[in-house]
Amino acid sequence: MRTDNGSFPPDFLWGAATASYQIEGAAHEDGRGESVWDRFAATPGKVRNGDSGEIACDFYHRYRDDVALMRELRLDAFRFSIAWPRILPEGRGRVSQAGLDFYDRLVDELLAHAIEPFATLFHWDTPQALEDAGGWPARATAEAFVEYAEAVASRLGDRVRHWITHNEPWVCAWIGHAWGHHAPGRTSEADAVAAAHHLLLSHGWAAEAIRRAAPGARVGITLNLAHSYPATKSPEDEAAAWRVDGEGNRWFLDPIFRGAYPADLLERNEIVAGFVRDGDLAAIAAPLDFLGVNNYFRFVVSAGADGPQMVRDPEAEQTDMGWEVYPDGLHRLLVRVAEEYAPPVIYVTENGAAFGDVRTHDGRVHDPERTAYLESHIGAVLRAVADGAPIGGYFVWSLLDNFEWAHGYAKRFGIVYVDYPTLERVPKDSFYWYRDFIASRRGAPRPSPIATA
């Protein structure tokens, strides 16, 4: 896939990404069950301003208009997630045909506009009924996930070719189960380790189930990865950066690609040993068709008395999330993952930035910082392609401003502005930049998004 002329391959996919709870709304329609995020957002003090995804961007009702925006962008692909509580309101057992009908309509609308659907099965909205029964720290939730994957793939697998089992299992496990900042709001390291193992295990099991239901499917998983840089060349800082890399990156990459958890994380291995059964690691390491990589920033790490410490450069540009803008970190990450783990294809399934966007007197949203961010990070992806990394596509996060988890609606990542009181969509300057950039890269006819036998 190496390109000698400094350009992207002709079959490179340009896309945008979203997630169900962040955009869909319609939280109580067509039999959708309660999710952990519904419960978490309804708990006072958990989400900024008491916001929730009850309405969000109302994508559930406005998806046709939003697909028209995608077509205006000339997107090759759209990455969306499916809400588990829409399909199995109790988490397992009864399947809601109305829930499947919505995604059926969405997929057909995408294909009618020649946009390849990339379906993510889990983007953190666990059915509350399963959380009540033990949640991801319980092995039974991994078993329930397979039932869900089978139901969805059996309905959509004749048209959806690309399947992502999980989005960012590290975030679900640690921010949701150890730190309590995300749903379900637990604060137990043991719960986080157990949840991470069962998320990975359910990925392996679901990959097999998807391929049974849709033999032509291409199956992957999306990990949030960030390269760890030592603050200095001291052995102490080097060791601290390696530990951070192990906890955030290798804890997921190693079992998926090598069938083992990283041995240097002794305390975590002692915890996970209580949850691993015979055959688990082999299931987790089932071959992938692609790896999804989400990246927003890098880590700069120094050794501290209480463990690794994150270091910030006060002079560096930062996004509205307080994240450093450092495109070289994306390049180094992609090349490193390609060289050390050799996934057959890598998709950059999320990359983008939040800034304090406002509508000006002309009715437009001028966001030069985001345009510069996207241009520099797409340039980093191009350098990774030139260095031999098998990158198959890039998905900007996000198509729409949306519910940003515990931040509520205070952070705007979209290339389309959403006026939340009216739900009006206003393409930002970055939208038009991305549209024109994609058009400039059209060097060959796009392959049909409809699978052929």
Image (spheres, grey):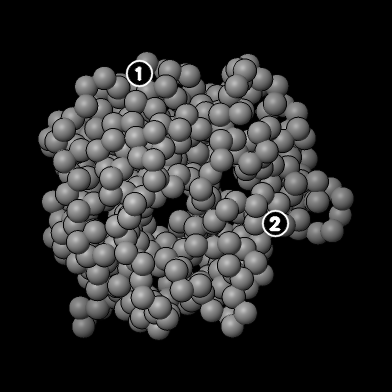
Q: Is residue 249 left or right of residue 401?
A: right
Task: Please state which of residues 119 and 412 is positioned toward the viewer in this rendering.
Answer: 119
Residue 439, how many percent across, how many down?
36, 80
Which residue is most to the front? 453
Residue at the disc numbered 1? 132
Q: What percent of the width, then of the height, locates residue 85?
A: 26, 32
Total numbered labels: 2
Q: Is residue 377 visible?
A: yes
Residue linked to disc 2: 339
Q: In this view, does 92 lie above or below 82?
A: above
Relative to 138, residue 364 above or below: below
Q: Residue at image x 38%, y 64%? A: 15
Which type of secondary structure does the marked residue at label 1 adopt?
helix
**What's the amino acid at mark 2?**
Glu
**Picture residue at 14% right of the left edge, 36% below the top:** 98
Q: Which residue is at 62% across, 18% downward?
A: 278
- Looking at numbered disc 1 in the image, what kind of residue is underneath it? Asp
Picture quadrant of residue 273: top right
Regarding residue 51, the answer to whether it shows in the image is: no
* Residue located at (46% from left, 63% from top): 393
Tell me which numbered mark, 2 or 1, is placed earlier along the sequence.
Answer: 1
Q: Is residue 50 left or right of residue 193?
A: left
Q: Residue 165 carries which label?
A: none
Residue 230 % position (x, y)? 76, 56
- Is there a contact, CB below 8 Å, between mark 2 and mark 1? no
Q: Looking at the figure, which quarter contains the N terminus?
A: bottom right
The one of 94 and 108 positioned closer to us in this rendering:
108
- Looking at this view, name the residue that lies furthest to the right: 235
Pair 2/1: label in front: 2
User: Which is more toward the observer, 422 or 21?
Assistant: 21
Asked if residue 43 is positioned above or below residue 217 in the image, the reply reads above
